[in-house]
Image (cartoon, helix red, strand yellow):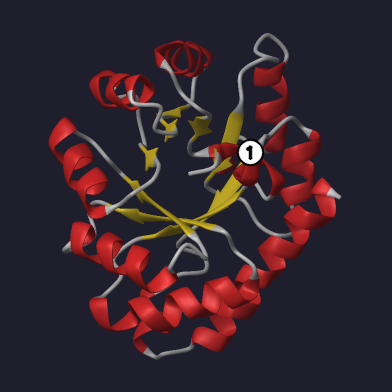
């Protein structure tokens, strides 16, 4: 992952439970919609295989990483598959330490002030505030009071409508997932609708960054 490029469009799509048959049409859909960064969660069946195929299909047109990485074993599987960044729902210090040592962008999850600070000190590229939607943008603003130098990515409960509020409250990035990449829509092949939703997120973030 080129972190500088991610900072220009700090938006991440979280894909969970994707089936092999849907990889190519979904990738083409989100790339066309303007999304530049996706993570495939490691609790997806054959996650490593899907990541490898996604990297191959995308040909560098989108950055592919791995999410829900909970152990060093999963980390190695993800990296071997071609993941260029790592996301965790919590702070697994061994995983973060390995990534920091190898200059691999890593986004560990945290919620409380103590967890956020510990994750940042462990070597986080950004701290994934999860689930952000429980407390909303105001919570990000409160965290940024004492932690103005800690980079935060809001995950959970982010919508195109509240994206600007998250950024104005201090978020450095946002992410979305299940609200867009719904299993039923994927099974029905409703990629056009998924693309429209992704584009709304992309436009919302671009509007803020411009």
In screen coordinates, is 25 left or right of 199? left
Q: Nearer the viewer, residue 103 or 33?
A: 103
Residue 132 position, x and y percent, is 56, 38
In screen coordinates, is 22 left or right of 25? left
Name the residue at 41% across, 90% down. Answer: 189
Name above or below for residue 195 compared with residue 84: below
Q: Nearer the viewer, residue 65 or 45?
A: 65
Name the residue at 49% across, 34% down. Answer: 128
Name the residue at 53% across, 29% down. Answer: 126
Name above or below for residue 18 compared with residue 68: below
Query: Is residue 32 shown to the viewer in this render?
Result: yes
> In the rendered picture of this protein, how many numbered marks are placed on residues?
1
Residue sitting at the far front:
59
Give the residue number, with chain letter if any, for mark 1. 4
Q: Nearer the viewer, residue 157 or 146?
A: 146
Residue 39 position, x and y percent, is 41, 54
């Amino acid at each position: 992952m080129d972190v500088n490029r991610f900072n220009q469009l700090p938006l991440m799509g979280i894909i969970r439970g994707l089936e092999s048959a849907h990889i190519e049409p979904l990738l083409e859909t989100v790339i066309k919609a303007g999304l530049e960064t996706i993570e495939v969660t490691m609790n997806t069946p054959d996650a490593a295989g899907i990541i490898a195929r996604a990297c191959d299909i995308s040909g560098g047109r989108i950055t592919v990483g791995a999410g829900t990485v909970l152990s060093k074993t999963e980390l190695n599987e993800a990296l071997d598959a071609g993941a260029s960044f790592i996301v965790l729902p919590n702070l697994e210090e061994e995983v973060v330490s390995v990534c920091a040592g190898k200059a691999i962008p890593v986004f560990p999850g945290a919620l409380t002030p103590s967890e956020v600070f510990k994750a940042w000190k462990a070597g986080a590229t950004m701290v994934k505030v999860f689930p952000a939607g429980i407390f909303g943008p105001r919570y990000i603003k409160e965290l940024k009071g004492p932690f103005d130098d800690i980079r935060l990515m809001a995950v959970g409960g982010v919508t195109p409508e509240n994206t600007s509020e998250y950024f104005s409250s201090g978020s450095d990035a946002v992410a979305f997932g299940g609200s867009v990449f719904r299993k039923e829509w994927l099974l029905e092949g409703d990629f056009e609708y998924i693309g429209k939703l992704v584009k709304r997120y992309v436009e919302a973030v671009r509007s803020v960054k411009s």
